[in-house]
Image (tube, grey):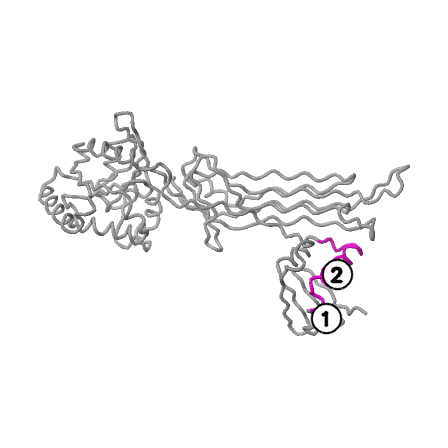
Amino acid sequence: MFVDKAKIYVKAGDGGDGQVSYRREKYVEFGGPWGGDGGHGGDVIFRVDEGLRTLVDFKYQKHFKAKKGENGRTQAMRGADAEDLIVRVPPGTVVIDDDTKEIIADLTRHGQEVVVAKGGRGGRGNMRFASPANPAPAIAENGEEGQERWVVLELKVLADVGLVGFPSVGKSTLISVVSAARPKIAAYHFTTLTPNLGVVDAGDGRSFVMADLPGLIEGAHEGVGLGHEFLRHVERTRVILHVVDMAATEGRDPYEDWLTINKELALYSEKLIERPQIIVANKMDMPGAEEHLASFRERLNAEYGDRGYEIFPISAIARKGVQQVVYRLADLLDQIPETPLVEEVAEKEERKVFRLEDNRESASFTIRRENNNFYVEGEELEKLVKRTKLNSHDAFVRFGKILRSMGVEKELRRKGAKDGHMVYIGDFEFEFVEQE
């Protein structure tokens, strides 16, 4: 089974909670706070494994969750960080954020890694909040939530040579002749529904990978037929081998076939039409092929003579002229860099963890009023609420001071908040009280 597209859910581990504890030992006067920090949650990491060829594993498992960091402990012991979750993907996998459609990574090399979901930071223990004004704080933080997202995986076949052309022009026959690949071959359209890969031995110590890709039809760039499923694989190839049925066994004009396919490639991506292309005139052992080839050459030279397209007449089924094509492909590949002909996506910056104490002035928020209720919205504030353990007086007092320092209280008062009005920040709600 060849699966080349999958949508999966990834969830990084949450950070461990900070600990509230105190040092109580005989002969240790004023022991003070002794609660350790929580450990960091595990990241979800995609790693390329060249032993994989399809995304079939993701057909049966669609949820991947990393473990939570350990909670902080007494005696100032920090909780252990959770192990990262490694998800193996085949080379040629493009990772796309399902919400923004942004490309997260283009994974092509064995061992290449990308952090798809960053684990949450561990919460701080009460040792971290000690100060001269409050030497024994009963304050600790919850761990930060790990990042979660839906991502789409698209597999683009990594091959040196890609066979393109209308259905039933002989692409599958050609790859079965020049390599050990054994694709299903039959006399009807779309015999090839998924890419077939074959290693071609040129016979002189050189070899390369050839991909027999599903046939194209007009409108493919808009998804007609196998459309995008075909075209995404063509992007990876270094050389395009355009197979044309020169005997016109389907009743079509060979030259118009060639124009149609190139038009679809150009409409999908301008870069594809600039890719080195060799034309293979197949089925030359059949009646009418010579006449069609002569007409093909004449029209090609008249319209595209400056492009220097090479034409190789062959009969794949009779194995005539095939070796010359193999030699030419090997020579051409020697001249082309082996680096993938795709734009490398720069590694994304590690997701920044907001630290409120360092960002009070820059933290942004909005307040909207509905009847007598006030809703305070802002990413930093919502993170603060989730991290703060509001089950102690010290923590609640600290929370109130931070709101005042950020200007939230002043803005609430300006919006008309009075004693008894309810204020909501994320899932947390409290009653507004005017300070005397």
Which residue sits at x=32%, y=52%? 268
62, 231: nearer the viewer: 231
Assess disc 1: are there few (<14), some (14-19) or many (≥20) residues with their C-alpha within 10 Å of its C-alpha.
some
Q: Are marks 2 and 1 in contact (CB under 8 Å)?
A: no
> How far from the left and from the top, in percent, is residue 64?
54, 44
Question: For residue 400, which numbered disc appears in the image?
Answer: 2
The three-letter amino acid code for the residue at tag 1 is: His
* Residue closest to the eye, 342 or 18: 342
As drawn, 403 above or below 110: below
The residue carrying mark 1 is: 421
Badge 2 amino acid: Gly
Residue 142 is left or right of residue 225, and the answer is right
Region in magenta: 388-410
Work out whether mark 2 precedes mark 1 in sequence or the reverse, and give the earlier one: 2
Which mark is in front, 2 or 1?
A: 2
Mark 1 element type: loop
Q: Nearer the viewer, residue 194 or 368?
A: 368
